[in-house]
Amino acid sequence: MPTVRFEEPWVPGFRSAVRTSAAEGWSVREHRGGMRLQVRHQGGSMQTVALPFDWARRSTGDALVRIRNIYALVEEGHTLRSAADVLDGKAPATIKPWKEAAERFRDQKILHGNAIKATTWEKNYGPVVTMAVDLLSSAKAPGRPDDLLDQCIRDWEPGSRARQIRAQSLSQFLRYCVDRESFPELWSPPVDLRSHVGVKSANGSPTRKGDPLTDQQIIDLVAGLPKDETGKRWCDAIRLCSELGLRPIELLYLSVRRDPSTREFHWWCSYCKRSGGGATAPRRLEPLALIDQNDGLQNWDLLNRWLTGAITLPPLESGNGAAECLKTYLNRQKAWVQLKTVMAAAGERLVPYSFRHSYSLRCHQRGIDGGSAAAAMGHSYEVHCRSYPWASEAGVVAAFKRARAQAVPGL
Protein backbone atom coordinates (compact mmCIF):
# COMPACT_ATOMS: atom_id res chain seq x y z
CA MET A 1 0.00 0.00 0.00
CA PRO A 2 1.51 3.40 -0.96
CA THR A 3 2.38 5.96 1.68
CA VAL A 4 -0.50 8.41 2.11
CA ARG A 5 0.38 12.08 1.94
CA PHE A 6 -2.65 14.39 2.35
CA GLU A 7 -1.19 17.56 0.87
CA GLU A 8 0.46 16.26 -2.25
CA PRO A 9 0.45 18.87 -5.05
CA TRP A 10 -1.54 16.70 -7.49
CA VAL A 11 -4.63 16.45 -5.23
CA PRO A 12 -6.23 19.94 -5.81
CA GLY A 13 -5.90 19.60 -9.57
CA PHE A 14 -7.38 16.10 -9.49
CA ARG A 15 -10.38 17.24 -7.47
CA SER A 16 -10.92 20.15 -9.86
CA ALA A 17 -10.86 17.71 -12.80
CA VAL A 18 -13.47 15.54 -11.07
CA ARG A 19 -15.86 18.48 -10.72
CA THR A 20 -15.29 19.40 -14.38
CA SER A 21 -15.88 15.80 -15.51
CA ALA A 22 -19.07 15.41 -13.48
CA ALA A 23 -20.91 18.19 -11.65
CA GLU A 24 -20.79 20.46 -8.65
CA GLY A 25 -20.88 18.38 -5.49
CA TRP A 26 -18.86 15.51 -6.97
CA SER A 27 -15.53 14.97 -5.28
CA VAL A 28 -12.99 12.35 -4.20
CA ARG A 29 -11.15 11.66 -1.00
CA GLU A 30 -8.63 9.23 0.42
CA HIS A 31 -9.96 6.30 2.39
CA ARG A 32 -7.56 3.76 3.90
CA GLY A 33 -5.08 4.26 1.11
CA GLY A 34 -7.77 3.91 -1.55
CA MET A 35 -9.97 6.30 -3.45
CA ARG A 36 -13.60 7.10 -2.60
CA LEU A 37 -16.05 9.04 -4.75
CA GLN A 38 -18.57 11.19 -2.89
CA VAL A 39 -21.58 13.13 -4.16
CA ARG A 40 -23.08 15.87 -2.01
CA HIS A 41 -26.69 16.80 -2.86
CA GLN A 42 -28.51 20.02 -2.28
CA GLY A 43 -29.75 19.97 1.28
CA GLY A 44 -26.59 18.39 2.63
CA SER A 45 -27.14 14.66 2.12
CA MET A 46 -24.25 12.70 0.67
CA GLN A 47 -23.64 9.39 -1.10
CA THR A 48 -20.27 7.67 -1.39
CA VAL A 49 -18.85 4.69 -3.19
CA ALA A 50 -15.38 3.11 -3.25
CA LEU A 51 -13.36 3.25 -6.45
CA PRO A 52 -10.91 0.43 -7.35
CA PHE A 53 -7.85 2.69 -7.36
CA ASP A 54 -5.03 3.62 -5.00
CA TRP A 55 -4.87 7.14 -3.70
CA ALA A 56 -1.88 8.01 -5.89
CA ARG A 57 -1.06 10.33 -8.79
CA ARG A 58 -0.54 7.43 -11.17
CA SER A 59 -4.23 6.39 -10.66
CA THR A 60 -5.80 9.75 -11.51
CA GLY A 61 -6.15 9.14 -15.25
CA ASP A 62 -8.02 5.84 -14.89
CA ALA A 63 -10.06 7.25 -12.01
CA LEU A 64 -11.26 10.21 -14.07
CA VAL A 65 -12.43 7.88 -16.84
CA ARG A 66 -14.30 5.77 -14.29
CA ILE A 67 -15.90 8.83 -12.66
CA ARG A 68 -17.05 10.20 -16.04
CA ASN A 69 -18.68 6.82 -16.83
CA ILE A 70 -20.34 6.67 -13.41
CA TYR A 71 -21.71 10.18 -13.90
CA ALA A 72 -23.11 9.24 -17.33
CA LEU A 73 -24.92 6.22 -15.87
CA VAL A 74 -26.33 8.29 -13.02
CA GLU A 75 -27.69 10.74 -15.58
CA GLU A 76 -29.41 7.78 -17.31
CA GLY A 77 -31.25 6.81 -14.12
CA HIS A 78 -28.85 4.63 -12.14
CA THR A 79 -28.11 5.30 -8.51
CA LEU A 80 -24.51 6.02 -7.59
CA ARG A 81 -24.13 2.48 -6.20
CA SER A 82 -25.72 0.72 -9.18
CA ALA A 83 -23.61 2.78 -11.61
CA ALA A 84 -20.44 1.73 -9.80
CA ASP A 85 -21.63 -1.90 -9.82
CA VAL A 86 -22.24 -1.75 -13.58
CA LEU A 87 -18.70 -0.60 -14.21
CA ASP A 88 -17.36 -3.24 -11.81
CA GLY A 89 -19.20 -5.90 -13.83
CA LYS A 90 -21.67 -6.65 -11.03
CA ALA A 91 -24.84 -5.47 -12.81
CA PRO A 92 -26.23 -4.97 -16.36
CA ALA A 93 -25.21 -1.76 -18.06
CA THR A 94 -28.71 -0.77 -19.07
CA ILE A 95 -31.63 0.17 -16.85
CA LYS A 96 -35.05 1.23 -18.04
CA PRO A 97 -36.60 4.37 -16.56
CA TRP A 98 -38.49 3.68 -13.34
CA LYS A 99 -41.59 5.55 -14.49
CA GLU A 100 -42.01 3.43 -17.60
CA ALA A 101 -41.45 0.26 -15.59
CA ALA A 102 -44.16 1.38 -13.15
CA GLU A 103 -46.63 1.84 -16.01
CA ARG A 104 -45.94 -1.65 -17.31
CA PHE A 105 -46.21 -3.06 -13.79
CA ARG A 106 -49.67 -1.50 -13.48
CA ASP A 107 -50.78 -3.16 -16.73
CA GLN A 108 -49.38 -6.48 -15.52
CA LYS A 109 -51.31 -6.30 -12.24
CA ILE A 110 -54.62 -5.27 -13.80
CA LEU A 111 -54.60 -7.24 -17.07
CA HIS A 112 -52.71 -10.46 -16.34
CA GLY A 113 -52.28 -13.23 -13.80
CA ASN A 114 -54.39 -12.96 -10.65
CA ALA A 115 -55.68 -9.63 -11.98
CA ILE A 116 -56.71 -6.93 -9.55
CA LYS A 117 -59.29 -4.22 -10.05
CA ALA A 118 -58.28 -0.71 -11.04
CA THR A 119 -59.64 0.53 -7.71
CA THR A 120 -57.36 -1.91 -5.87
CA TRP A 121 -54.39 -0.57 -7.80
CA GLU A 122 -55.31 3.02 -6.89
CA LYS A 123 -55.74 2.12 -3.23
CA ASN A 124 -52.92 -0.34 -2.52
CA TYR A 125 -50.31 -0.03 -5.26
CA GLY A 126 -50.47 3.34 -7.02
CA PRO A 127 -49.55 5.62 -4.07
CA VAL A 128 -46.50 3.69 -2.91
CA VAL A 129 -45.20 2.93 -6.43
CA THR A 130 -45.55 6.58 -7.42
CA MET A 131 -43.72 7.66 -4.28
CA ALA A 132 -40.94 5.15 -4.99
CA VAL A 133 -40.53 6.35 -8.59
CA ASP A 134 -40.34 9.96 -7.43
CA LEU A 135 -37.65 9.08 -4.89
CA LEU A 136 -35.67 7.00 -7.35
CA SER A 137 -35.78 9.81 -9.91
CA SER A 138 -34.59 12.45 -7.46
CA ALA A 139 -31.09 13.68 -6.72
CA LYS A 140 -31.25 11.94 -3.34
CA ALA A 141 -32.26 8.56 -4.74
CA PRO A 142 -31.90 5.64 -2.29
CA GLY A 143 -29.15 3.26 -3.35
CA ARG A 144 -30.68 0.05 -1.97
CA PRO A 145 -34.17 -1.51 -1.87
CA ASP A 146 -34.08 -1.62 1.93
CA ASP A 147 -33.59 2.15 2.11
CA LEU A 148 -36.32 2.70 -0.48
CA LEU A 149 -38.77 0.55 1.47
CA ASP A 150 -38.11 2.38 4.72
CA GLN A 151 -38.59 5.80 3.13
CA CYS A 152 -41.85 4.79 1.44
CA ILE A 153 -43.58 3.28 4.49
CA ARG A 154 -42.26 5.33 7.42
CA ASP A 155 -45.36 7.54 7.56
CA TRP A 156 -47.53 4.58 8.55
CA GLU A 157 -47.70 3.11 12.03
CA PRO A 158 -45.22 0.26 12.60
CA GLY A 159 -46.97 -3.09 12.50
CA SER A 160 -50.15 -1.68 10.94
CA ARG A 161 -51.96 -3.42 8.13
CA ALA A 162 -51.62 -0.31 5.94
CA ARG A 163 -47.84 -0.34 6.36
CA GLN A 164 -47.71 -4.05 5.58
CA ILE A 165 -49.73 -3.60 2.38
CA ARG A 166 -47.49 -0.75 1.20
CA ALA A 167 -44.36 -2.81 1.85
CA GLN A 168 -45.78 -5.82 0.02
CA SER A 169 -46.94 -3.71 -2.95
CA LEU A 170 -43.56 -2.01 -3.32
CA SER A 171 -41.77 -5.35 -2.95
CA GLN A 172 -43.86 -6.74 -5.82
CA PHE A 173 -42.91 -3.76 -7.98
CA LEU A 174 -39.19 -4.21 -7.31
CA ARG A 175 -39.39 -7.94 -7.99
CA TYR A 176 -41.19 -7.21 -11.27
CA CYS A 177 -38.45 -4.75 -12.28
CA VAL A 178 -35.73 -7.32 -11.67
CA ASP A 179 -37.53 -10.34 -13.16
CA ARG A 180 -39.35 -8.76 -16.09
CA GLU A 181 -37.54 -5.49 -16.83
CA SER A 182 -33.94 -6.73 -16.37
CA PHE A 183 -33.12 -4.21 -13.68
CA PRO A 184 -29.92 -4.91 -11.72
CA GLU A 185 -30.21 -7.79 -9.26
CA LEU A 186 -29.21 -5.43 -6.48
CA TRP A 187 -32.80 -4.05 -6.64
CA SER A 188 -34.28 -7.40 -5.59
CA PRO A 189 -36.50 -6.73 -2.55
CA PRO A 190 -35.72 -8.38 0.79
CA VAL A 191 -37.35 -11.78 1.23
CA ASP A 192 -38.51 -10.99 4.77
CA LEU A 193 -40.34 -7.68 5.15
CA ARG A 194 -40.97 -7.99 8.88
CA SER A 195 -38.05 -5.80 9.88
CA HIS A 196 -39.45 -3.02 7.67
CA VAL A 197 -43.10 -3.39 8.66
CA GLY A 198 -42.20 -3.62 12.35
CA VAL A 199 -44.57 -4.34 15.21
CA LYS A 200 -46.98 -2.17 17.10
CA SER A 201 -45.90 -0.58 20.32
CA ALA A 202 -46.73 -2.58 23.42
CA ASN A 203 -48.59 0.51 24.66
CA GLY A 204 -50.72 0.74 21.55
CA SER A 205 -54.22 -0.67 21.13
CA PRO A 206 -54.46 -3.99 19.29
CA THR A 207 -56.11 -3.96 15.91
CA ARG A 208 -59.68 -5.28 16.06
CA LYS A 209 -62.00 -5.76 13.15
CA GLY A 210 -65.14 -5.31 15.21
CA ASP A 211 -67.42 -7.37 17.42
CA PRO A 212 -70.68 -9.15 16.62
CA LEU A 213 -74.11 -7.89 17.63
CA THR A 214 -76.85 -9.97 19.15
CA ASP A 215 -79.93 -10.54 17.02
CA GLN A 216 -81.93 -8.30 19.35
CA GLN A 217 -79.41 -5.48 19.06
CA ILE A 218 -79.73 -5.57 15.26
CA ILE A 219 -83.53 -5.66 15.49
CA ASP A 220 -83.54 -2.68 17.86
CA LEU A 221 -81.09 -0.76 15.69
CA VAL A 222 -83.22 -1.21 12.57
CA ALA A 223 -86.29 -0.12 14.52
CA GLY A 224 -84.49 3.00 15.68
CA LEU A 225 -83.38 4.24 12.25
CA PRO A 226 -85.37 6.91 10.32
CA LYS A 227 -88.45 5.71 8.44
CA ASP A 228 -88.21 8.12 5.54
CA GLU A 229 -87.46 6.78 2.05
CA THR A 230 -83.69 7.05 2.54
CA GLY A 231 -83.89 5.41 5.95
CA LYS A 232 -85.91 2.49 4.56
CA ARG A 233 -83.23 1.81 1.94
CA TRP A 234 -80.47 1.73 4.56
CA CYS A 235 -82.58 -0.49 6.82
CA ASP A 236 -82.93 -3.03 4.01
CA ALA A 237 -79.19 -2.88 3.38
CA ILE A 238 -78.58 -3.71 7.06
CA ARG A 239 -81.17 -6.50 7.00
CA LEU A 240 -79.51 -8.08 3.95
CA CYS A 241 -76.02 -7.88 5.46
CA SER A 242 -77.29 -9.38 8.71
CA GLU A 243 -79.44 -12.19 7.33
CA LEU A 244 -77.06 -13.18 4.52
CA GLY A 245 -73.70 -12.47 6.20
CA LEU A 246 -72.63 -10.04 3.48
CA ARG A 247 -69.65 -7.75 3.22
CA PRO A 248 -71.11 -4.27 2.54
CA ILE A 249 -69.59 -4.24 -0.97
CA GLU A 250 -71.42 -7.49 -1.79
CA LEU A 251 -74.72 -5.60 -1.76
CA LEU A 252 -73.64 -4.35 -5.19
CA TYR A 253 -73.22 -7.92 -6.47
CA LEU A 254 -76.41 -9.38 -5.04
CA SER A 255 -78.99 -11.16 -7.21
CA VAL A 256 -81.57 -13.95 -7.18
CA ARG A 257 -81.35 -17.15 -9.21
CA ARG A 258 -83.69 -20.05 -9.80
CA ASP A 259 -82.63 -23.63 -9.22
CA PRO A 260 -83.33 -25.55 -12.48
CA SER A 261 -84.18 -28.76 -10.66
CA THR A 262 -86.36 -27.49 -7.79
CA ARG A 263 -87.54 -24.29 -9.51
CA GLU A 264 -86.96 -22.50 -6.21
CA PHE A 265 -85.41 -19.06 -6.00
CA HIS A 266 -82.26 -18.46 -3.99
CA TRP A 267 -79.82 -15.64 -3.27
CA TRP A 268 -76.59 -15.36 -5.28
CA CYS A 269 -73.47 -13.20 -4.84
CA SER A 270 -71.16 -12.68 -7.84
CA TYR A 271 -68.47 -10.78 -5.93
CA CYS A 272 -64.92 -12.16 -6.16
CA LYS A 273 -62.65 -11.03 -3.36
CA ARG A 274 -59.03 -11.03 -4.51
CA SER A 275 -56.17 -11.45 -2.06
CA GLY A 276 -52.65 -12.83 -1.88
CA GLY A 277 -54.06 -16.33 -1.57
CA GLY A 278 -56.18 -16.09 -4.71
CA ALA A 279 -59.81 -15.14 -5.28
CA THR A 280 -63.06 -16.28 -3.71
CA ALA A 281 -65.60 -17.65 -6.17
CA PRO A 282 -69.17 -16.41 -6.69
CA ARG A 283 -71.44 -18.29 -4.32
CA ARG A 284 -74.94 -19.20 -3.30
CA LEU A 285 -76.04 -17.40 -0.15
CA GLU A 286 -77.82 -19.07 2.73
CA PRO A 287 -80.19 -16.78 4.70
CA LEU A 288 -80.25 -17.18 8.47
CA ALA A 289 -83.19 -15.30 9.98
CA LEU A 290 -82.75 -13.44 13.26
CA ILE A 291 -84.55 -14.44 16.44
CA ASP A 292 -85.63 -11.82 18.96
CA GLN A 293 -85.37 -12.05 22.73
CA ASN A 294 -88.83 -13.68 22.89
CA ASP A 295 -87.79 -16.44 20.47
CA GLY A 296 -89.75 -14.83 17.67
CA LEU A 297 -88.39 -15.43 14.15
CA GLN A 298 -87.91 -12.20 12.21
CA ASN A 299 -89.62 -12.59 8.87
CA TRP A 300 -88.33 -9.67 6.82
CA ASP A 301 -89.50 -11.33 3.58
CA LEU A 302 -86.37 -10.09 1.84
CA LEU A 303 -86.35 -12.58 -1.04
CA ASN A 304 -89.95 -11.93 -2.14
CA ARG A 305 -89.54 -8.19 -1.70
CA TRP A 306 -86.41 -8.29 -3.87
CA LEU A 307 -88.22 -10.26 -6.60
CA THR A 308 -91.10 -7.80 -6.67
CA GLY A 309 -88.81 -4.78 -6.78
CA ALA A 310 -89.85 -3.56 -3.34
CA ILE A 311 -86.21 -3.29 -2.21
CA THR A 312 -84.14 -0.38 -3.48
CA LEU A 313 -80.62 -0.16 -2.15
CA PRO A 314 -79.07 3.16 -1.04
CA PRO A 315 -76.13 4.73 -2.91
CA LEU A 316 -73.07 2.57 -2.19
CA GLU A 317 -70.60 3.37 -4.97
CA SER A 318 -69.42 6.84 -4.00
CA GLY A 319 -66.38 7.80 -1.93
CA ASN A 320 -64.18 5.01 -0.62
CA GLY A 321 -66.57 2.13 -1.13
CA ALA A 322 -69.74 0.53 0.21
CA ALA A 323 -68.45 -0.04 3.75
CA GLU A 324 -67.44 3.61 4.06
CA CYS A 325 -70.84 4.75 2.71
CA LEU A 326 -72.63 2.59 5.28
CA LYS A 327 -70.35 3.86 8.04
CA THR A 328 -70.95 7.49 7.07
CA TYR A 329 -74.72 7.06 7.17
CA LEU A 330 -74.78 5.16 10.46
CA ASN A 331 -72.44 7.60 12.22
CA ARG A 332 -75.09 10.26 11.70
CA GLN A 333 -77.83 8.18 13.32
CA LYS A 334 -78.65 8.46 17.02
CA ALA A 335 -79.51 4.77 17.39
CA TRP A 336 -76.11 3.72 16.02
CA VAL A 337 -74.17 6.20 18.16
CA GLN A 338 -75.99 5.04 21.29
CA LEU A 339 -75.35 1.38 20.49
CA LYS A 340 -71.67 2.11 19.82
CA THR A 341 -71.43 3.80 23.24
CA VAL A 342 -73.04 0.81 24.98
CA MET A 343 -70.70 -1.64 23.27
CA ALA A 344 -67.64 0.50 23.95
CA ALA A 345 -68.51 0.49 27.66
CA ALA A 346 -68.46 -3.31 27.49
CA GLY A 347 -65.06 -3.27 25.76
CA GLU A 348 -66.53 -4.06 22.33
CA ARG A 349 -66.16 -2.30 18.98
CA LEU A 350 -69.06 -1.59 16.65
CA VAL A 351 -68.31 -1.34 12.91
CA PRO A 352 -70.31 -1.88 9.68
CA TYR A 353 -68.80 -5.38 9.44
CA SER A 354 -70.43 -6.23 12.80
CA PHE A 355 -73.54 -7.35 10.88
CA ARG A 356 -71.43 -9.92 9.00
CA HIS A 357 -69.68 -11.00 12.21
CA SER A 358 -73.09 -11.52 13.76
CA TYR A 359 -74.02 -13.93 10.98
CA SER A 360 -70.89 -15.96 11.75
CA LEU A 361 -71.80 -16.09 15.43
CA ARG A 362 -75.40 -17.04 14.58
CA CYS A 363 -74.13 -19.95 12.46
CA HIS A 364 -72.14 -21.29 15.40
CA GLN A 365 -74.97 -20.84 17.88
CA ARG A 366 -77.35 -22.80 15.64
CA GLY A 367 -75.00 -25.75 15.18
CA ILE A 368 -73.71 -25.02 11.65
CA ASP A 369 -70.20 -26.37 11.22
CA GLY A 370 -67.32 -24.00 10.49
CA GLY A 371 -66.69 -25.30 6.98
CA SER A 372 -70.30 -24.72 5.90
CA ALA A 373 -70.37 -21.27 7.49
CA ALA A 374 -67.11 -20.35 5.75
CA ALA A 375 -68.46 -21.47 2.36
CA ALA A 376 -71.65 -19.47 2.82
CA MET A 377 -69.67 -16.36 3.81
CA GLY A 378 -67.22 -16.63 0.93
CA HIS A 379 -63.88 -17.23 2.59
CA SER A 380 -61.63 -20.13 3.51
CA TYR A 381 -62.04 -22.29 6.60
CA GLU A 382 -58.67 -21.00 7.82
CA VAL A 383 -59.81 -17.38 7.57
CA HIS A 384 -63.07 -18.28 9.29
CA CYS A 385 -61.26 -19.82 12.23
CA ARG A 386 -58.80 -16.94 12.51
CA SER A 387 -60.95 -13.89 11.88
CA TYR A 388 -64.59 -14.51 12.74
CA PRO A 389 -66.19 -14.93 16.16
CA TRP A 390 -67.94 -18.25 16.57
CA ALA A 391 -69.16 -18.09 20.10
CA SER A 392 -70.23 -15.68 22.77
CA GLU A 393 -69.94 -16.63 26.42
CA ALA A 394 -73.55 -17.78 26.41
CA GLY A 395 -72.96 -19.84 23.27
CA VAL A 396 -69.98 -21.61 24.82
CA VAL A 397 -71.99 -22.48 27.93
CA ALA A 398 -74.86 -23.82 25.81
CA ALA A 399 -72.51 -25.89 23.64
CA PHE A 400 -70.95 -27.62 26.64
CA LYS A 401 -74.37 -28.21 28.21
CA ARG A 402 -75.45 -30.00 25.02
CA ALA A 403 -72.27 -32.08 25.03
CA ARG A 404 -72.73 -33.11 28.66
CA ALA A 405 -76.40 -33.96 28.09
CA GLN A 406 -75.44 -36.28 25.21
CA ALA A 407 -72.70 -38.05 27.18
CA VAL A 408 -73.27 -41.76 27.73
CA PRO A 409 -73.50 -42.63 31.48
CA GLY A 410 -70.74 -44.86 32.75
CA LEU A 411 -68.12 -43.89 30.17
Image (cartoon, rainbow, N blue to C red):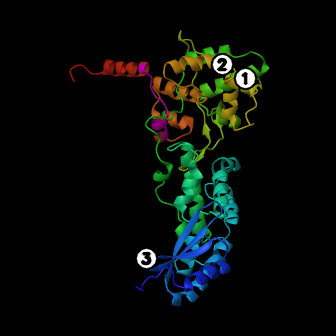
What residue is shown with label 3?
32
Q: Is residue 392 magenta?
A: yes
Residue 226 x, y percent position in the rendering: 73, 16
Q: Which mark lies nearer to you, 3 or 2?
A: 3
The segment highlighted magenta reads 383-393
Instruction: Measure how far apart labels 3 and 2 are at the Cα level.
Output: 82 Å
Q: Secondary structure at mark 1?
A: helix
Q: Are marks 1 and 2 in contact (CB under 8 Å)?
A: yes
Q: Earlier in the sequence, mark 3 or mark 2?
A: 3
Disc number placed over residue 300 in the picture, else none: 2
Residue 307 x, y percent position in the rendering: 74, 27
What residue is shown with label 1?
305
Instruction: Measure how far apart labels 1 and 2 are at the Cα level.
Output: 9 Å
Q: Is residue 55 above or below residue 110?
A: below
Q: Amino acid under label 2?
A: Trp
Q: Amino acid under label 1?
A: Arg
Q: Residue furthest left?
A: 410
Between 256 and 12, which is closer to the camera in this rendering?
A: 12
Q: Is residue 153 visible?
A: yes
Q: Is residue 387 above or below residue 288?
A: below
